[in-house]
Image (cartoon, rainbow, N blue to C red):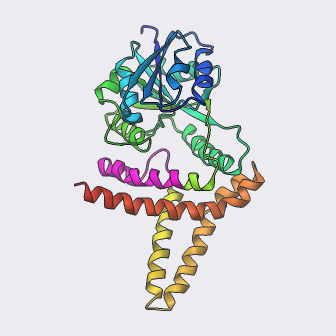
Amino acid sequence: MAKISASVVVPVHNGSKTIEACLKSILGQKTGYPYEVIVVDDGSTDSTAEIVNKFKSVKLVSQRQQGPAVARNNGAKNAKNSIVVFVDSDCIANSNWLQEMLKPLEKESIAGVQGRYKSLQKELVARLIQLEIEQRHDKMAERKFIDFMGSFSAAYRKRVFMEMKGFDTSFPMASGEDTDLSFRIAKKGYKLFFSPKAIVAHLHPTSFRKYLKVKFYRAFWRIKVYGKHREKVAKDSYTSQTVKVQIALVFLLALSLAAGIAIPLGFYAAALFAALLFLSGVPFAAWAFKRDKAVGTAAPFVIMARSIVFSAGLVLGTLNQLRSR
């Protein structure tokens, strides 16, 4: 097998505050694999392009604002190497990140590789998000192969990526298009691999409101994903089954409250489902408490709010898909 080479693609929109540090980390990789760096400017109105142009070895591709899916696809089209590696513009890669992303692809049977997040943020919400992700990544690391890859740090064989026609550009924002692509690739029989040593530092939301907003849109667009991949409603390598139980409890809680208007017993049922929803967050809270006491203490309450917002996103996402038919 010929030695592999990579094209690192960074989609960016108004990323002037983060793109310089991101590019410095990518250009400073300690790897024996040859690679190029491509930045796709998705219609930025700030100084992003000027900052990117300071890096003479970086190829800048500009487009009108069309969203991250189009930007990534555009980057792949401009890539000259056999592996396309995507990384978000607010990520800072560890010095061995690219080496660990590409090493599994020495095996011809591997079509894609997923990297891992870390965060050094001090805010409570950011720390909670990081622990949520770490628990899921720990479970992914136990699997030989996965069927779910997030585009924040993802490598694909270019021929496979182009065969799949890249990311589905009907997803207008960064939510769901990477899940959809992963499912399509896995469905074709290609193998996807999780590389836990391929680490990038990422900036998570720091406000509770932003956290819930992200969760809402993840659920909203997940309905579109499930419409294309109905078999994944039951199980995938990233989504916890506990999350699905929590969503079911939210719907039962809502139905019980509605029934309580006519039948007083409904309110007792609602209290029971609310208690079960709270208790469903205790296992994660206990796991998190060992690592961060403040996060562990807050977790059951956050999980209740997250589950309610996620359920609302699923309902509105379903209505949106029905309306668009």
Viewer-proximal residue among 188 and 101: 101
* Number of callouts: 0
Q: Answer with left or right where residue 290 lies relative to residue 322.
A: right
Name which residue lies at 49% across and 22% down.
49
| 290, above or below 154, in the image | below
Quadrant location of the C terminus in the rendered image = bottom left
Majority secondary structure in the magenta region: helix
Viewer-proximal residue among 105 and 325: 325
Boundaries of the magenta span: 213-240
> Where's residue 156, x and y in %?
42, 25
Q: Is residue 133 magenta?
A: no
| 94, above or below 315, in the image | above
> Where's residue 282, x and y in %?
66, 62
Q: Answer with left or right where residue 117 lies relative to residue 231.
A: right
Name which residue lies at 39% across and 16% down.
79
Q: Which residue extends farthest left?
A: 325
Q: Answer with left or right where residue 204 lies relative to residue 9.
A: right
Q: Is residue 198 at all visible to an observer of this figure?
A: no
Q: Answer with left or right where residue 89 lies relative to residue 191.
A: right
Name which residue lies at 57% across and 32% down.
90
Viewer-proximal residue among 151 and 91: 91
Quadrant location of the N terminus in the rendered image = top left
Name which residue lies at 57% across and 79% down.
272
> Where's residue 117, x and y in %?
60, 36
Q: Based on the displayed image, in which of its 4 quarters is residue 305 positioned?
A: bottom right
> Where's residue 64, x and y in %?
36, 30
Q: Is residue 56 at all visible to an observer of this figure?
A: yes
